[in-house]
Image (spheres, rainbow, N blue to C red):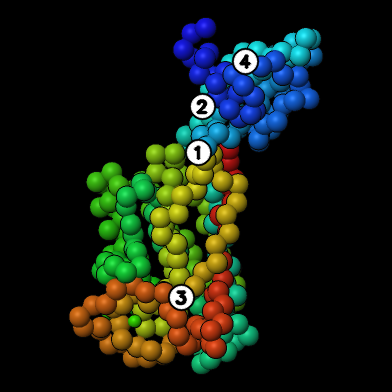
């Protein structure tokens, strides 16, 4: 038995919970598997066998005497490229957030973000906002943030700029379709809450690959963040630079948290279109 075959048998034995070389019948197969396909009368193909953090695909021959034989097994890899749609749904209304709600004015600026590697951060709570995040959070403009992302792309930290529409009147929704690759499987995406001093919603460093596979769907509730760059405390506060600049924080007070009730403003739904 060569090393590779030994490793495969060991893997399957661990998954099945059998001693390394015990015979097993089809009825004894107790695998956590994403899907199984009967190849012919004697063989089954098993995809996405879970073993710790890894997933494996295997073809197993089932013998008449109840024994089995591993014909092949390999680490399951995510496809190199994927395409996703992100649907931004805003529930933010006078019903969800009655305190000083800016009726007739409430909207969200155009989506802006990036696909990137794990170490890169477009924004992080507890850190100071970049000039691009400040501009986005205060005015909804994308130019500085786009330039920062282009610079990160030039450095090899990010791959694509994600740029989409906003929500002209909240509640409402908008969607954006984007490409993503296995080398840059993380997404960061933001939108300004408007009107507001420097408040925004978004995600930071979200991986669309889990356990080696592209996710089918991921739903994330959106809460309000303060960019730490403007002092205003209500939706229509006049512009007033925070000096010195503060850090990005999750807003835990009015108008977003009332009597300890912190309701999301909406959600991002990431849906895989292909493969
Ligand atoms: Ca602020
Ligand atoms: Ca400012």
- Judged by depth in the image, the label closer to the viewer, 3 or 1, is 1
Task: Tell me which numbered mark, 3 or 1, is placed earlier along the sequence.
Answer: 1
Q: CA distance from mark 4 to mark 1?
A: 24 Å
Q: Position of residue 204 (x, y in %)?
A: 41, 60
Q: Quadrant of the C terminus?
A: top right
| Residue lying farthest to the front in this orientation | 19
Q: Earlier in the sequence, mark 3 or mark 4?
A: 4
Residue ID for mark 1: 53
**Residue 195 in view (yes/no):** no
- Of marks 1 and 2, the one in the foreground: 1
**Dot 4 or dot 1, earlier in sequence:** 4
Q: What whole-number distance in Å separates the C-alpha atoms at marks 1 and 2?
A: 11 Å
For marks 1 and 2 on the same chain, the one whose residue lies earlier in the sequence = 1
The relative height of residue 248 versus residue 78 in the rendered view (above or below) is below
* x and y, in percent, of residue 131 in the image: 25, 69
Q: Tell me the mark number nearer the camera, choosing from 2 and 4.
A: 4
Q: Which residue is denoted by mark 2 in the rendering?
A: 75
In this rendering, the label closer to the viewer, 2 or 3: 2
| Nearer the camera: disc 4 or disc 1 | 4
Residue 2 locus on image (x, y percent): 48, 8
Residue linked to disc 3: 224
Residue 261 in sight in this render: yes
Query: Mark 2 or mark 3, which has the lower sequence index?
Result: 2
Q: Nearer the viewer, residue 87 or 54?
A: 54
Q: Which mark is residue 36?
A: none
Residue 2 relative to residue 13: left or right: left
Separation of disc 3 and disc 4 at Cα? 56 Å
Identify the residue position indicated by label 4 in the image: 21
Q: Quadrant of residue 249?
A: bottom left
Q: Decide: marks 3, 1 in contact (CB < 8 A)?
A: no
Q: Nearer the viewer, residue 2 or 173?
A: 2
Q: Cα distance, mark 2 to mark 4?
A: 21 Å
């Amino acid at each position: 038995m060569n090393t590779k075959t030994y490793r495969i048998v060991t893997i399957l034995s661990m998954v099945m919970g059998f001693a390394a070389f015990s015979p097993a019948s089809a009825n004894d197969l107790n695998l956590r598997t994403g899907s199984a396909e009967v190849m012919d009368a004697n063989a089954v193909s098993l995809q996405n066998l879970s073993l710790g953090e890894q997933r494996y695909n295997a073809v197993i021959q089932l013998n008449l005497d109840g024994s089995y034989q591993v014909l092949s097994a390999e680490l399951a890899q995510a496809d190199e490229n994927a395409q996703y749609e992100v649907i931004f749904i805003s529930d933010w209304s006078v019903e969800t957030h009655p305190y000083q709600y800016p009726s007739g004015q409430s909207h969200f600026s155009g989506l802006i973000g990036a696909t990137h590697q794990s170490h890169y951060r477009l924004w992080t709570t507890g850190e100071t906002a970049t000039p691009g995040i400040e501009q986005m959070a205060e005015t909804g403009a994308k130019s500085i943030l786009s330039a920062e992302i282009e610079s990160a792309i030039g450095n090899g930290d990010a791959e694509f700029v994600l740029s989409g529409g906003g929500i002209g009147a909240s509640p409402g929704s908008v969607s954006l379709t984007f490409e993503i690759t296995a080398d840059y499987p993380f997404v960061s995406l933001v939108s300004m809450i408007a009107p507001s001093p420097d408040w925004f919603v978004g995600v930071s460093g979200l991986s669309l690959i889990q356990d080696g596979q592209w996710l089918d769907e991921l739903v994330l509730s959106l809460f309000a963040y303060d960019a730490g760059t403007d002092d205003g405390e209500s939706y229509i506060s006049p512009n007033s630079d925070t000096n010195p600049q503060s850090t990005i924080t999750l807003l835990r007070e009015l108008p977003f948290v009332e009597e300890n009730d912190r309701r999301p403003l909406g959600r991002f739904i990431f849906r895989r279109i292909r493969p």
